[in-house]
Amino acid sequence: MEVVIASSSTDAGIGCWELQTGAEQLRYKSCASPSHGLTSVGNRFLASSQITSSSSGSILYWSWSKPHVEVRSFPAEPIRPLISNSHGTYLIGGGVSGHIYFWEVTTGRLLQKWHAHYRGVTCLALSDDDSLLISGAEDGHVRVWSLFMIFDDVRREETRHLYEHSFSEHTLRVNNVVVGYGGCNAIVVSASDDRTCKVWSLSTGKLLRNIVFPTIIDAIALDPGEHVFYAGSRDGKIFIAALNADCSSSSSYGMHIIGLLSDQSKAVTCLAFGVDGVTLISGSEDGMVRVWDTMTHNITRIFKHSKGPVNNILVVKQPDSFNLPNTQVPSTKRRGSLVVPPLDKYLDFTDETKDIEAVIAYQETCKRPLDPSYVSFHVMMNHIKEFQKQDSSAATEMDVERLKLECKRSVQMVQQWKKLYENLHQFCVNELLDGVQSGGTNVDSS
Amino acid sequence: MASFDHFINMYDIKLKPRMLRSLMKQHIPDEKHPLQNPTELSTVVSLIKTHRLLSESFDESVNPTHVEEWKSAVDKWVDRLSTLVSSKLPDKCWMGICLLGVTCQECGSDRFCALYSNWFSMLLTHIQALSDSHFVRIACFASISDLLTRKEQWTYCAKLLTFSHRPLFVIMKVETATVSKILSRRCGDTVMKKCAYCLALLTKSKGDEHSWSLMMQKILFTVNGQLNDVFQGLEESKGSEITRFLVPPGMDPPPPLGGQQILESSNQALNMSEQLILSTVSNLMLCCCTMLSTTYPVQVTLPIHALVALMERILMMDGSLPQTLLPFISVTQQENLCMQLPVLHSDTLDLLTATIKQVRSQLLPHAARIIRILTEYFQRCQVPMLRVKVYSIIKILLISVGVGVISQLAHEVIQNASIDLDCGNLEGSGFSCATHSEVITKTLQQSSNRKRKHAGTTRTIEEKQTDVGAELPKIKPPTPIQLKIAALEALEALLTVGGSLGSETWRPNVDCLLLTVAASACNGGWYGEEQNTLFQLTEPMSSCHDLQLAALRALLASLVSPARVRPPYLHQGLELFRKGKQEVGTKLAGFCAHALLALEVLIHPRALPLIDVRTANYVSFDERVNSIFPQKMFSDSKRNNCPISMDQLGISSGDPHADYDELYDSWLGNGDANEIQKSNHDADVIHSLEPQTSREPDAEKLVSSVPSSEAMITDEIEKESATVVPDRATGHKDEIMVEAPNIQEPVATVVALPVVSADSSCANAEKVKISLETSADANCDNVKASSETGVLEHTDPKMVSEKDFSTAKIETLASLSKTTFTVSDSKNQGYVFALNDEPSMDLFPDIVDGDPDSD
């Protein structure tokens, strides 16, 4: 079931609508997330960062089936952007001080923490192979980190800087970063307060294109074919900017901008693509979530989230079993209540048990043991084959065993016969003797 | 009555009990009759399986009397089996056990649930009795594993977790029995393997997290303990460290594997030879593998730190005496150990593979350590089969961990692969291999030298590397095909994952190496697949066919994987694939066809519009181009083998620059047009130099020198543009950028022309023009005339602009943008013109406007 999930910076909860039918699902309570602070952890549960004051914040978990918060963790500083890798094994959060925190979900351990930016981290993105992390910050930098490098203690000390690339062309705060398709060959698009969007190449680390917009862009969504990208602006318009597209027809909005989606709304704060690659979902400051058809440029649906601004939108495929709470009681019990520990606050260097264990997660393949492999039949066939071969030692061994037993039995039989014979013999002898004796007596008597 | 009560059809339920009874009567002996012929058993089993005689599944509508009858028949069957299993005669017993295994698999859930524990104890007695015949034991393990498999499945379906806890004590007993089998080493190899498998399945059938982790801990603990004995005197004690990882300080060590008595008995047997201990270790590791690779209904924790440490301990043991310790082991002991070590390493590598596969993304914190172990092991390892395994692990790692590993692994993989691929022996493959291999060895040496300068800290590793490099050519054993295939696959993975990131240093070498290998593998003609059948008796051996396939796969990866320059060996590659495609009906031909398809995009880059009203026109145009060009290219390359043919090929095919370059350049519409040409420029310099003198020093110098200046220029320009950008006064520059990215269309080949001509003589430019004309000729009629002239006239302004650029390196921003304006403008019109199919005349004067710049 494909659902649209939206959260707001005011405490309006997390709204959840089915994309196909438009039916509203469960509303998860007590969430006031910062921008980019909502993520789905491996499609298993929702996580969101919260900023309560300038010096404290929290990270909350909701399971799909329950509206209230299940797990609360309190990191060392307020976390703004929060993302998870596609398996849902790690949570990565960007702090307001410019640190990036790297937690393991199943154990809650803080595996790594590093100083990434001079000022607060505003947005994070992972490349599609989950190996490169891209972060944007208030200082206008966009940096690319190799996660492998982050965990390589030896090489970390050798190199001057941890990052792979540092893009510093933005002059003001970076609002959003998205990564395209193709691992290390992908492109990165970043939006900034300096009214530009910039396209970077991950492999070469160079600026590929600079696009100037009439207003500040807060949200970007890449078309799945990377033909164009959609940029949601502060004046409520969604601009369509060309990547691969033919933009020979000059537009009045500016270079590379080839179109516009507009609904007279307030500022567009977040954008997301549906699974079909055609549906675009936008969240706006007026509390509405709009669903667009990018082919026709029409709005197909509007969800009302709240009066306050929507600032996060996710499109998630919810697990099916969550829909059938009645039929699978044990399953939902296991699934429903989260068994995930809260996240650690500090990096624990003193503890010897750090990263000593890995959790092999419950795997989807266990779900339906379709064709279990039975072996005894094949073993039997092999044995039969051996039997047919004349010179098989194992078969002979068994024959010998059998013959031994038979021999034993025959010996027993022989013994028995002997005994019988002896008995009979004795009997006959006795009879005879008795007969003679009795005969004798008879004779005597007669 | 019964004799006239006919069945409806072959699926009638009445038939089943009757069949079962007659089967029993005819084929299954009871205690009185001896077993006639074991081969009959297969008939019985296949009948049972096809007719599902034991399933007891029926519709609701079935007459209850028939159900009863069936039930009683199955009851009888089960009784008969239990008499057979408990029979003294080994053949009957064997038969009973086999049939019990099949019954476990086939019978209905209710019956299985009811009889499960009975069967379990019956089989258990046989496992515990050590006197049974070999067959009986194997059959017993097979049956018990089926029983556990079934139980696990059934447990899942019924969701009755309580059930699985009930026979816990029974399972403990089995554990004891199985472990005693493993530790006592009285059985043959196959039985041992089955034992290990059973042990692994045991935890699965228990189905909770704790027992799994405990079992894993126990096994690792035991292995570590055994290794302490074996490695004594050969290493400084690493065992205690691993024990500390396994059992955190302050915690109790796990109960010994298989209970107390087993431990004692194995302690008694300490004086047995190392060989036996090592085979036990191997079996226990196999058990770990199985535990890791089978799926579990719950999530479990793996003591990965200890596991990795243990694997490191084993892999780092090469039988050498440490300098620091006094040798207090005998030569015989060392000999024994060295004899067994390869097997142990092989098992460890298997375990490593299983771990990497299972831990998946959680591997990340440990990946660096594993890679360090692997690279060190790789330098020492000389056994081909072990190297094959290392390659395959590297392949898995590359794909699972992703781009980050590349920088760490690339050098290692390439160096080892080029040794294993034996470039010295590749002479005379028709593609001037001698020079290739020379180049490779030279560049490799260079790169290793370079590396030594860079990383002076890892001195010992470097020393070993040079050792390996120096020794191997002298020995020169023929590399087994399997090893070559593994090396090729690792290179393929390397290119697939990170062809472009930080690859400038190694990419040309790898491309060259792969072409050489592919060419030499395919040089002696094509091996048929049927060679495999000769060896059918043994394992499916990898033949030359597989090697060719692997070489071509790697070559395709090298051609397709993005790089900074377009693939230099495209022509040779295409040639190979075309030849291979003609081997009709082989796997290789199939792959070659696929490769040609994949490369086609490289030659005709596509930037198809998302929605296009002119769809029909556009497609037909594209098709026509495609249908004409391949033939032409083929004939071209056939006819003249002179070096220039590749240039012609590149240009006439409409793609002097692979999609990467063009895309990259087209991005930079923003006042950086000079950079486009610059980068094209050095691409073509390399390209034109390549065929005559494959990578001469000055060509290298060019490559190395150009990017720096280029980067400088780029920086400057970008700085400038960054300052200009924020304000609105970017008027005319904006217009340029709108038009830039159209270069990807086939007709947009013009970009390349000025580059070649600016670099070399004018005569060259003439030739290029001619070739373009011919290509235009090949186009359909209505486009022909106009495109010919149009394209030709486009070339000129850019030639000039390029010259401008090369003479005055950096001009003012204003003049730069002016030249780029004319360039992109005319380019764009050419494109629109070609695409639209109907000549739009109003665009023509613009092009001619640009013309006065020429000559």
Image (cartoon, coloured by chain):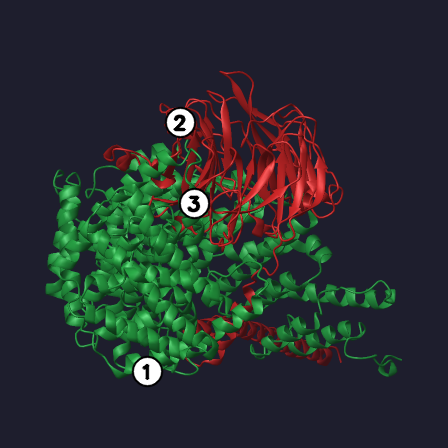
Amino acid tagged 3: Asp
* In the image: residue A370, left or right of residue A227: right
Image coordinates of residue A417 in percent, x first then y, are 58, 75
Q: Quadrant of residue B7?
A: bottom right
Q: Which residue is mark 1?
A: B635
Seen in the image, is B324 located left or right of residue B350?
Answer: left
Same chain assignment for discs 3 and 2: no
Mark 2 → mark 1, Cα distance in angstroms: 58 Å
Circle 1 — which element?
Answer: helix
Chain identity for the colour red used in the image: A
The residue located at (16%, 38%) in the rendering is B457
CB atoms at circles 3 and 2 under 8 Å apart?
Answer: no
Residue where numbered disc 2 is placed = A139
* Amino acid type for the residue under numbered disc 2: Asp
Task: Tell me the subunit letter for badge 1.
Answer: B
- Residue placed under numbered mark 3 in the picture: B734
Count residues near mark 3 (Cα–Cα under 10 Å), then give few for <14, some for 14-19, many for 20+. Answer: many
Task: Decide which of A23, B673 is in the foreground and name it.
Answer: B673
Q: Position of residue B726 (x, y in %)?
A: 42, 33
Residue A439 placement (x, y as % from top left): 70, 80
